[in-house]
Image (cartoon, grey):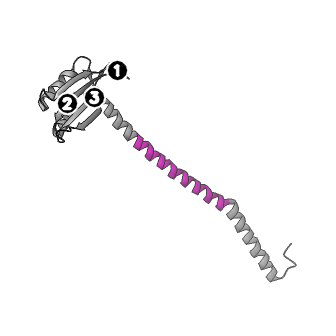
Amino acid sequence: MIGSNLNRREQLFLLGGGIILVVLLVYVGVVAPYRNSIQRLETRITARERQLQEVRALQQEFNQLKQQTAEVEQRAGQEGRFSLIAFLEEKALAIATRDNLVYLRPQPKVQLEGLNEESLEIKLEKIRLDQLVELLYATETADTLLKVKSLRSKARFDDPTLLDVVLVIAAYGKA
């Protein structure tokens, strides 16, 4: 045999070298690839958990948007059930006097994704800031869907505590 003509010390070195070689081959051939695959799988699990959290967040956002859409559709009244001119005139006269209301000017109707948009430009002069806020609050809390599309305000030269305001307010109804 190979080790028969070797002395005891040489046989031990040869046996030790063989054991080290076998251990290295087992480590390089089995243990290291196993550890690498475990590490890759843990990385993929972490990435998938992060993706799952993102999907859950998107699902929650989708549900909120779906609920908001349902509320908007509910608030968007049927055509003809709501008169924007009458509503704004009533609110403006309740907040200010007829002298403050300069004009109510209807804007062209627009159709947007299944909704009709009816806009109205309203000009108020010599009103206080709290009156403007009250009008905006009335617009925001109306039973139907209203949106302030533009707001221009200017302090008066003769009395800086009073404002001249031009608003464009839109009402939305189902087409």
Per the image, label 2 sits on a secondary structure element best described as strand
- In this rendering, is residue 42 above or below 22? above
The answer to whether 43 appears left or right of 114 in the picture is right
Q: What residue is at 44 percent from the left and 42 percent from the top?
A: 55
Please say if the residues under marks 3 and 2 sit with CB atoms less than 8 Å apart: no
Q: Could you tell me the amino acid type at mark 2?
A: Leu
3D distance between C-alphas at marks 1 and 2: 25 Å
Per the image, label 1 sits on a secondary structure element best described as strand
3D distance between C-alphas at marks 3 and 2: 12 Å
Residue 44: image location, x then y, percent: 55, 50
Q: Which range is magenta?
A: 30-58
Q: Residues within 10 Å of mark 2 (few under 14, many from 20)?
A: many
Q: What residue is at 65 percent from the left and 61 percent from the top?
A: 32
Q: Could you tell me the amino acid type at mark 3?
A: Val
Residue 2: image location, x then y, percent: 86, 73
Residue 27: image location, x then y, percent: 68, 64
Mark 1 or mark 3: which is in front? 3
Please say if the residues under marks 1 and 3 sit with CB atoms less than 8 Å apart: no
Q: Residues within 10 Å of mark 3 (few under 14, many from 20)?
A: some
Residue 166: image location, x then y, percent: 25, 31
Per the image, label 3 sits on a secondary structure element best described as strand
Mark 1 or mark 2: which is in front? 2
Q: Could you tell me the amino acid type at mark 1?
A: Val
Q: Quadrant of residue 139?
A: top left
Q: What residue is at 13 percent from the left and 27 percent from the top?
A: 99
